[in-house]
Image (tube, helix red, strand yellow):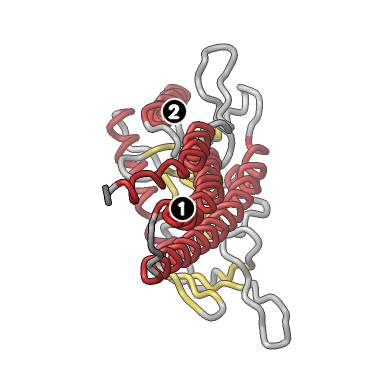
Amino acid sequence: MAWLEYLLPLIFLAPLGAGTVVVLVLRNLHDARVRSPFDAHLLREPGQALRNRLDRAFARLFLNGALGPIAVLTPMVYGMGRMLFAPHQNWLEWMLYGLLTTVLALLFSFLLMRDYQHIRRIKLGLACELAVGQELERLIRPEAHPYFVFHDIPSDTFTIDHVALTPHGVFVIETRARTHPLSPSGEPQSTVAVESERLRFPGWSERQPLRKTRQAACWMQHWLARECGVDVPVRGVLVLPGWQIDNEHSPADLVVVSGEGLAKLLAEARLGQLSDTIHDRIARALERRGALLDNRRLERPSI
């Protein structure tokens, strides 16, 4: 029967299929999330959202790196089986197997390069968030000097990198990582000019970071008004670690800084005066809001 010539070579694919099953089972073997031994809640560190993205990116890299060779070998192994069972060799069919193998090799090579670039970008963003988080930790004092720092606070549609609560207001802090371009002489260009609606980097400009910082501050102000029943002074802060900031034409509704001396800047800023009752109410509301991110992670398994 002619159809057996195409069915019997599938036997040779059994080892590749077993390898695929093993790879899929092991893809979530690494899980960097850690639970508290006190209340079993997930512990959060600065840049936790980026840490989770990095874990998923490494999982994709593992899948593409492990499944790529299996997928590339599949047409060739099947074709070798066809050689054993087919009474006549069809060179057009063999050319099809070779073409399919080449396409799969190019596809997985592209996926691996994409994953590598994605991981590099996430690592750069994580490094910047860790640097900002370390700077913000200097705000923490005893209860008599109540400064609180919260990381990865979820809004309705996005995640806020950091929120600092002081006796004089709430600061919504967004971090953006950008690499320094090189001048024709090979020197890094690290000065960014801040305008009311955009950032002018050496060679390009961006509007999205300022827009997202304003959006985060606006959302936080409205959300705190609903949660606490009073208007809470909120200021957006955009941090560009490693850059020299030209604030000559910067807007008045938010602050753009490099990150150095950020704790001192926030401690000295005076947006208003929060009573002890309102201050504690804000802290409890932010703690509850931060816990929502843990619940979302539990409901959405890593890829």
What amino acid type should be assigned to the residue bearing mark 2? Asp
Q: Residue 283's spot in the image, x, y percent? A: 46, 27
Picture disc at residue 84: 1
Q: Examine the rendered structure and indicate whether residue 233 appears above or below residue 68.
A: above
Q: Residues within 10 Å of mark 1 (few under 14, many from 20)?
A: few
Visible residue check, residue 150: no
State which tag comes first along the sequence, 1 or 2: 1
Query: Depth-wise, is mark 1 or mark 2 nearer the camera?
Result: 1
Q: Residue 261's spot in the image, x, y percent? A: 67, 51
The residue depicted at 39 percent of the width and 48 percent of the height is: 217
Which residue has dot 2 on it?
A: 294
Tag 2, which secondary structure?
helix
Mark 1 and 2 residues: CB-CB less than 8 Å, in contact? Answer: no
Q: Residue 37's spot in the image, x, y percent? A: 59, 13
- Furthest residue toward front: 87
What amino acid type should be assigned to the residue bearing mark 1? Leu
The residue depicted at 45 percent of the width and 66 percent of the height is: 98
Q: Examine the rendered structure and indicate whether residue 145 appears above or below residue 67.
A: above
**Image quadrant occupied by the C terminus:** top left
Residue 96 lies left or right of residue 42; in this view the side is: left
Visible residue check, residue 262: yes
* Residue in front for this viewpoint, 207 or 18: 18
Q: Residues within 10 Å of mark 2 (few under 14, many from 20)?
A: some
* Residue in front for this viewpoint, 5 or 171: 5
